[in-house]
Image: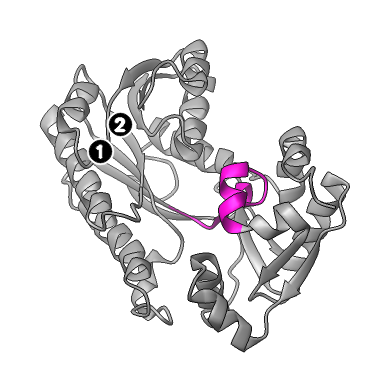
Amino acid sequence: MVKVLVLGATGQQGSATARALLSSGKNAVRAYVRDASSAKAKELAALGAEIVEGGDWDKDVAALDKALAGGVEAVFFISNPSFTDFSAEVKGATNIVEAAKRAGTVNHIVYSTVAGVESYEDLPGLDANPMFRNYWVSKAKGEELVKNAGLAHYTILRPTEFMSNWTREKMAMFQVPDLVKEGVWHTAMPPSFILSEIDTDDIGRVAAAAIEAPDTFVGGPNRVLKLTGERITVADLIAQLGEATGKKLSIYTYTPEEAEEAAKKNPAVAGQLTRLAKQEGLKPLEHYGLKFNTFKEHLANHIDEVKELYKNVP
């Protein structure tokens, strides 16, 4: 049995990791949350997790030390950006790594960042927006902190776009608010553009598999894994989403001039332009023996939430 601290345990990736670890019955899970009385924290407690409260990782070092005490062997956390304090993400990663080392029992850190971080310096428009540069630099620095921690194992996960960007209210209202409200997605991407999508439940399954078998899971004892569940065109994804919701959803592709103008105010469009400019050859997908969900399967698993989200589309 592995004793695991899952930070951000009520977030998408943290919750998925905690649930995957608990489902196997092989692990003791300590879930670090802001509010132990929240519904999501109570759900994890009901599944068998030990709930501990703590503040922001970049500030609450005492809570991190307390959470890591008592024989914790593995830690899971994500790259957690701040759009108000550009130093917060690296401070948080530093505090977690240092606290793990102080604990004296931790031998494995699992850190989830983002696909593309390995070549971020080649991204078009990297210096056009300080926030955009900081997003990538902070994740690269976080990876280096984990790799250089000197522990027996590290696992770095680099997931592609979350399927929940289209199906979870908080994410969709940032990424595709016009699609949710009006049924039309205004985007720099043409309908034929191929998206790389991952279900956050599958991120959790990979994290759990690495924690349970750090020496033998893919690339052990240390590994860096890109996570993509399915490649799907923009047109096909919107069609599947429309079929699931029973709504007529469509795409409006900006002209190059419109996209450049929209990107000045909308970071989501700026990200789309970067993806368009940095298309690479598509390597075969690797599911690491776990069989990841397709977008259609993801929709089926969240159908009530999806229908509720898009209910006001005309």
Closer to the eye: label 1 or 2: 1
Nearer the observer, 57 or 186: 186
Q: Give x and y (percent) for residue 216.
A: 40, 40
Sequence order check: which comes first, mark 1 or mark 2?
1
Instruction: Name the residue type under label 2.
Output: Ala
Q: Decide: few, some or many residues near mark 1? Use Cα within 10 Å; few <14, some 14-19, many ≥20.
A: many
Taking 301 as reference, is 40 left or right?
A: left
Determine if residue 151 is in view: no
Q: Secondary structure at mark 1?
A: loop
**Start-end of magenta stretch:** 158-175
Q: Give x and y (percent) for residue 80.
A: 35, 48
Mark 1 → mark 2, Cα distance in angstroms: 17 Å
Find residue 6 and name its label. Answer: none
Q: Tell whether position 240 is magenta.
A: no
Position above or below: 75 against 294: above
Find residue 74 and name its label. Answer: 2
Q: Give x and y (percent) for residue 67.
A: 24, 23
Residue ID for mark 1: 57
